[in-house]
Amino acid sequence: MHFHVITLFPKAFDSYLGESILKRAIEDKKLKVSFYNPRDFADNAYKRIDRPPYAGGPGMVIQAEPVIKAIQKAKGQRPKVKIIFLSPFGKQFTNSYASGVAKKFKDVIIVSGRYEGIDARVKKVFKMEEVSVGPFVLTGGELPAMLLIDVISRQVKGILGNFGSIEESRTASPDVYTRPESFKYKGKLYKVPKILLGGNHAKIEAWKSKRIK
């Protein structure tokens, strides 16, 4: 799986991609993340890519042409690419959506905006899908892009190691426990639910299902 991220701040991804499962997947060449900064495609000496919005309003808008060039660079000659335009007005991102992307595409371009957004004409140049990670607005698209990379990546066999670790494919309780079986804190005893210690898998699965509800 190869993610191509259009962003003004590629270094914002360093800490998350440099740890744990995603780091290992990148090192094992099961996952690749490339960055394309629209500033690198600006046609002025100052690498400026933002301008005031037409018709007025607060903030600045990222110009279309540098973003278009960045997307084209990411797309290259690849015949089958999924282009996702992050937007609070897009369709809701879900595990089901992530699974569908992982099954159908090896290359995913994520367009991550900033400021007041990106000139809407970008969406007319390329076939892309507007996606939202939730009913809220962030200062930029870097966090949503990281979220997409994480959720889609874990749908790819080999990245989690044990594919059974995907919670949505099994009955996973919101509460989990490990050793010790019991401990005291400020005089009160805290114990693991007895049903989890009995080894009756049918009863355990039924218990987990009730906890989800």
Image (cartoon, helix red, strand yellow):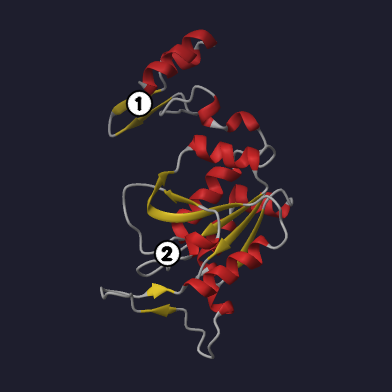
- Gap between marks 1 and 2 measured at Cα: 55 Å
Name the residue carrying label 1.
190
Residue at 45% from the left image edge and 54% from the top image edge: 144
Horizontally, residue 132 falls left or right of residue 10, namely: left
Which structural element holds mark 1? strand
Horizontally, residue 55 falls left or right of residue 112, namely: left
The local crowd at label 2, few if under 14, some if 14 to 19, many if 20 or more residues have their Cα within 10 Å, is few
Horizontally, residue 37 falls left or right of residue 26, namely: left
Residue farthest to the left? Answer: 57
Total of numbered circles in the picture? 2
- Image location of residue 11, percent across then percent down: 54, 69
**197 above or below 120?**
above
**62 above or below 207?**
below
Sequence order check, earlier mark of 1 and 2:
2
Q: Find residue 66 and name its label.
A: none
Which structural element holds mark 2? loop
Residue at 35% from the left image edge and 68% from the top image edge: 116
- Image location of residue 118, percent across then percent down: 43, 67
Q: Which residue is at the front of the view, 204 or 180?
A: 204
Three-letter code, disc 1: Tyr
Residue at 63% from the left image edge and 66% from the top image edge: 72
Q: Is residue 12 visible?
A: yes
Q: Find residue 120 and name its label.
A: 2
Three-letter code, disc 2: Ala
